[in-house]
Amino acid sequence: MNIGAQADAGGKGESGANEGAAAGEALLLVELAKSFGAKKAVDGVSLAVPHGCFFGLVGPNGAGKTTALRMATGLLRPDAGTVVVDGIEVWQDPRGAKARIGVLPEDLRLFDRLTGKELLSYTGLLRSMTEAVIDERSAELLGVLGLTEAADTLVVDYSHGMRKKIALAAALLHGPRILFLDEPFEAIDPVSARAIRGVLERYTDAGATVVFSSHVMELVERLCDRVAVMHLGRVVSEGSLEEVRGGRPSLEDAFVELVGATEVDTRELGWLGTSPG
Amino acid sequence: MARHFARLKLRLIRNGLRTGSARVVALILSICVAVPVAGIGFLLLAAVPRAEPGARLPVAVLSFTAVFFAWLLAPLLAFGTDETLDPARLELLPISRRHLMTGLLVASIIGVTPLATLVALSGAVVGFATLGPGAVLVAAAVIVEVLLCVSASRALITALSRMLRSRRARDISVVVSVSLAVVFNVGIQVGGRLLDSADRRMVDQASEVLGWLPPGLVGRSVVHAGTGDLITATVELALGAGVVAVLLVAWSRALDRMSTTAESTTTTTRAAGLYSGLLRVLPRTRSGVVAAKDLRYAWREPRRRAALVSMAPLACLPLAGVLFSSEEAVPAVVFTAVSTGGLFGLQSLNHLGMDGPPYWTNVAAGGDLRADLAGKTISTVTLGTLLSVIAAVALAAFAGGWGYMPLVAILAVALLLVETAVGNLMSVTAPQPVPEGSNPWGGGNTGQGCTTSLISLAAMGAMALLCVPVVVAVLVALMLWRPGLVAVSLLAVVYGYLLWRASLAMAARRAEERLPELLDAISPKRAG
């Protein structure tokens, strides 16, 4: 399943800032599997993500994207398979691997009785950063993400978009080489989405890697170099955008075809909108 | 429409029962409570007036008033609302206000509690009514009383649910309701004592005063209807019914406001930083920041604040012992203040569970269980010692013994270390998810309640056992040679620290490799 694929030439890794990166892929999943009871959430997923790549993981609800990302980030133990992040086997050396990655989970369960700034200090000190570095980077991240005003407000009082942004700041604070984002653009207003997108583009320009899952095909198409489509716990297609599209007009068309959804017959429901009021 | 709502309510009850054993258990429990309460209420109202005609007025007035306030307060203590009747859910449907209110009223009358209320109150028909028009009036009074209860509680809940939409109000309500529950308990204890010593005159006076409140009026009308004073009874009953009408109007207004006005503007809380103020002294390390976060959380997180606030009455127990004791208190009584910190230290049994799902932050940042547990110990020992010192100051103010104060603090540290030693192991071997939501008592991990409480009990036993040597040494020193207390206290800290270190190493060895599983264990399972 395209293991060992090299970086897409048209990708954003052109700035050539891959220096220092270990040879091989930023992320390598080999035959990753996880079941919950009888349900196979992830069923033998193999993927290779090159360094400096903006990698999109798409799939319908329940496809296993979140489970796969949780296993890749050391938050959920796989039943089988291996995860290698930046040359380190995640489940052999979790601490070493976690030092290289940043995570933005989907459900955003944060220590929300801390202020935005406090949450960043908390995360930074957990990662043994010095206070001076934390302060400097926090100020920058809060500024770029438009959270300076809200820095001293409890996260519980943040809007959904603000929560995503502060969680992204916390994930970026230690300058990880690979960033895992689970649905970073879901339920986000366009302004916040643009702020997040700007930060992510800067980040991959610097040679780092982003792996993110999303439902928003149009965004995936705009941002990603490579895409994998998951369905029922398996990768059904993986490659550069063109490869996955396979000549179809848009990624959405390819996606719908790949996961086997059918067109809605719009001739039914003819009574819609006919209420006399 | 009313039939529709009644069917909806019944369907919701039935579906609720189908979703899990917890609901079935809850229903059975509520029936187990409701049946005896209804029975006792019925007997009280049916038998006492016949047996002792002089007690008719107090029995009617006091029981009608008590039922009314129980209805008013119970939903507050139980956190609001029966969500099946949440009018906010019906806002978008084209239902007229009148239909909505009728429906909601009918739905609120269906249930175990309203049925129990009706059964208990109908005892009045047996106890007070005589054949004739009076009996009709008594029966009417029972119905008016039920309506009074239902409409008052509905109006209050609707008004409150609007208020409780803001985060800060919800936070406060958690703390208030926990305190209310504690006060309620203390009130029952104290009230019971007072009743024991009270004479008839006081009861008569109380019922005289309460008889002018709406439920009391209805209660009086029952008495008057029974004695044949039909005109007075009718007037009193009419007044009660008038109050029902007023309550219904108020409720209608509240419903109106709820569906047409915006949520209250969000208030935001600002804070100065993890390490500001007294916490400046904490180290800038992983365990330091975990301690700082936990100390901030002790006040900022409503459930932890509620736990802290509810310590207050418990902290007063040793003090109450001194105040109500007939003997002169000895200064050494300040040592009992250590128990206050000890009670707080029980929280360490589920250190990680208190963090819940957000603990992924620590796991994702390269899990270091040792440092996390150490940080949590710093916070627990600090707060526990502080509580002990506060209790000791209160005791010393009455009993003297200020000189013992430093020793109390040192001993508190020692015992809290012993407790967290057990807590470290428990937190990683039997971590428990703390249910989410504002209700501190709500929904536990269903089906395991019994096992987990047995394990916790065993752990508390272990804590107590490990504390015994310290307690014995202190008692011996107090009796034989007081200067020895200093050495005993310092040795106790060493003992506690050694235990704690050993348990930390064990806990880390056991769980360092199982952090993902631990994280899963402390995350409440979502419904569905």
Image (cartoon, coloured by chain):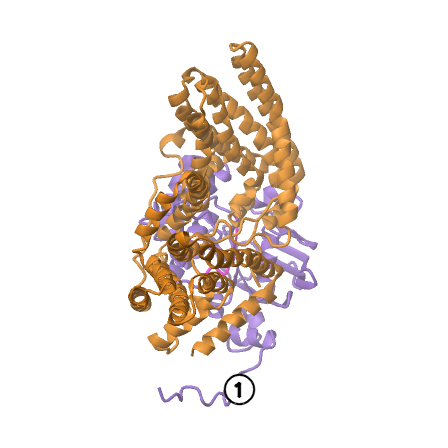
Chain colours: A purple, B orange
Residue B8 lies, in percent from the top left, at: 49, 73
Q: Which residues are magenta?
A: A177-185
At 41% from the left and 46% from the top, the residue drawn is B180
Pick the quarter of the image with the C terminus of chain A. bottom left
| Chain to which the residue tagged by mark 1 belongs | A
| SS under mark 1 | loop
At 52% from the left and 69% from the top, the residue drawn is B12
Residue B240 lies, in percent from the top left, at: 32, 64
Q: Which residue is mark 1?
A: A265
At 61% from the left and 77% from the top, the residue drawn is A260
Residue B523 lies, in percent from the top left, at: 56, 51
Pick the quarter of the image with the N terminus of chain A. bottom right
Q: Is residue B34 left or right of residue B387?
A: right
Residue A45 within the segment the image draws in magenta: no
Q: Specify whether residue A20 is in view.
A: no
Tell which of A72 and B243 is nearer to you.
B243
Q: Is residue B313 left or right of residue A229?
A: left
Question: Looking at the picture, does residue B67 appear above or below residue B311?
Answer: below
Question: Looking at the picture, does residue A88 appear above or below residue A275?
Answer: above
Tell which of A50 and B462 is nearer to you.
B462
Question: Looking at the picture, does residue B292 appear above or below residue B20?
Answer: above
| Label 1 Cα neighbours within 10 Å, binned few <14 / some 14-19 / many ≥20 | few
Tell which of B458 and B282 is nearer to you.
B458
Q: Specify whether residue B308 is in view.
A: yes
Tell which of B109 and B445 is nearer to you.
B109
Location of residue B510 by image quarter: top right
Q: Amino acid at mark 1?
A: Asp
Residue A264 lies, in percent from the top left, at: 53, 83
- Label total for image: 1
